[in-house]
Image: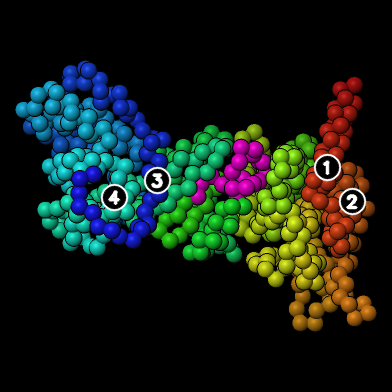
Amino acid sequence: MAHQKRNTERATSVEHEFGFQTSLNLSSDEFSNPDLLQNIMSAESLRKYLGLDAEPCSNVALSVRERILQSLVHAKPDDMTDRSLYLPIIEFNKIFTIETIKALVKERYSQATNAELQVKISELSERRRLLGIFLVMKSLHRLDAFVRESVTDIHLPLKIVTSYLHHDTRTRTSNEINTTLLKGWDANELRLFYDYQLMFFVPFFDIQKNGLRPYVLDRQVRLPWQSIKYKTSGGNGIVHKIKIHPSHHNFTPTRKPHQPLYFALKEIKTTDDLKYRLELSALEKICASIRKEKHLIKLLLTFKHGYKFYFLFEWADGNLGEFWELFPDGPTRSMKATGWAAQQCLGLANAVKRIHGLATWQKKNRDESSSQGASCADTHEWGRHGDIKPTNILWFSSHDQDSDLFVLSDLGLTRFHSAATRSLVLNTGIEGYTMTYSPPEMALRECISQKYDIWSLGCVYLEFCIWWLEGLEAVRKFENERTAGDEHFDVMQIDDFFVTIEIDGRHQPEVKPVVLKWIQRLRSEHQEDPFVQSMLNLIEQNMLVVNKADRLSADFICAAISQIVTEQAQQAKADSGRRAQ
């Protein structure tokens, strides 16, 4: 690039292109076609081609500008000012076709030879967005300097080095200051260029099936939200429900056709790059690999916008608690008839097993690494969720071929450890956990392990069984009785599943008597439901166990519930056979 340079500190900029390569609608072959200069449209024909009203004595450049301005939309639904306008990719591709470019070049260089026209058209193949900017500015002549200095769309948006009043600029792909590209521009031209370029550089989010593509976007970059609504705030972030312009992403919906496509946009409550990367690392380890676990939330996209960090997920219909509220009387007849409950419990256990690094393929990978001399202890792939509770279990009414799918989410507290340290985590370093579903080792200030999640999952399973048998009111009654029965605190009562008593001067935890009474009553009063009978046994004997060493690990929990699923299927088959006789 022919320009003067000055050394500067490293600038923060977009780390890669805006995803436009994924949404290209023109190939380089179209610009080198030998028949390119045949049948160039007149201004009148181009207006019709662009869907504009007929206008005598029209001008090509002004007609294209008119079409651009008609197609602008607002990036912020609550901001209807010009500073939120942008041109959607679908409209950009309709406007900046080879036919439009040919007509523009022919009008501007009416005396040029065919060879010269061919060169000019070719120069615009990588400058269609620059062309749009200068059309809106009514300053097409300014494009020549960008051609001379080999500046193309990929170098934009340009960066202001000091202010609108100075000509120094920096491209998106370089840290060097360019002092010649904008030389001779007046202050108004500079202001318009820096403003208008933002209308043409709104990202296309390439949501890849088997990986993540991180985006780093400057604060000024406009985001293609068709709607955005604040939904909730938690310890790890703020969640918005958003709708992305359909031409600015390539996500394939998992919902039934004709349902609106929404996303969950999680804004991380930190400007701390380390905290963001810890959560991202957890999500990448368990959610963004080729092996998918449908009961574990899938991270679709991550990006940084200015100083804020974001994660993008598919929008769920609610969480487990909200699902219970939608079905307050308990399961529907179809839910009872299909073995759905056991499948969902198994799916959640599989999700935890994957976080814990106990999936079959994860064990196989470690065995292979070990046989090749690699140290498993350094892989840091034994995770712990740390906050399993009903609000962190999402409900999708439909998801691919599944109905009423439960998905484990909110991995903000998830941490990964090596083989040597996975059972040696001090609970003083645990932040943001939910007391109701936390295990006794938290109260005793003992080191915590993956068995922490087994206790929490057992609590959720028990509440699910109560809803399954007796509905939402029973779940609420169970919660009230847990709290009311907590008499060991003089000052306050706590909603949890264990109580700490003092024996010989030592604090000894035990499962709350009221919890055990509920399990015994449910077992006694609902003997006709083998699913619940099996689940209650598993919960009482292997999950809500005070001594964490005696709790089953996630892979054994999965094996136990898998057996329940098999038994249900066999029973359903036998019942069907008897009815057929």
Q: Earlier in the sequence, mark 1 or mark 3?
A: 3
Secondary structure beneath dot 2 equals: helix
Instruction: Identify the magenta region.
Output: 283-302
**Residue hosting label 3:** 16
**If the image is split into quadrants, where does the N terminus sit?**
top left
Q: Please give the label number shown on residue 559.
A: 1
Query: How far apart are the alpha carbons under marks 2 and 4?
Result: 65 Å
Q: Earlier in the sequence, mark 3 or mark 2?
A: 3
Q: Earlier in the sequence, mark 4 or mark 3?
A: 3
Q: In terms of depth relative to the viewer, which is nearer, 369 or 566?
A: 369
Q: Amino acid at mark 1?
A: Ala
**Residue hosting label 2:** 537
Give above or below for 3 relative to 108. below
Q: Amino acid at mark 4?
A: Thr
Residue 245 image offset from top left, x and y in percent = 41, 43
Query: How far apart are the alpha carbons under marks 1 and 3?
Result: 45 Å
Magenta-drawn stretch contains 172: no
Q: Earlier in the sequence, mark 1 or mark 4?
A: 4
Left or right: residue 286 versus residue 266 is: right
Is residue 393 visible in the rendered image? The answer is no
Query: How far apart are the alpha carbons under marks 4 and 3?
Result: 12 Å
10 Å crowding of disc 1: few (<14), some (14-19), many (20+): some
Residue 324 image offset from top left, x and y in percent = 70, 52
Q: Comparing marks 1 and 4, which lies closer to the viewer?
A: 4
Residue 289 placement: quadrant: top right
**If the image is split into quadrants, where does the C terminus sit?**
top right
10 Å crowding of disc 3: few (<14), some (14-19), many (20+): some
Q: Comparing marks 1 and 2, which lies closer to the viewer?
A: 1
**Residue hosting label 4:** 171
Secondary structure beneath dot 1 equals: helix
Q: Amino acid at mark 3?
A: His
Left or right: residue 16 versus residue 389 is: left
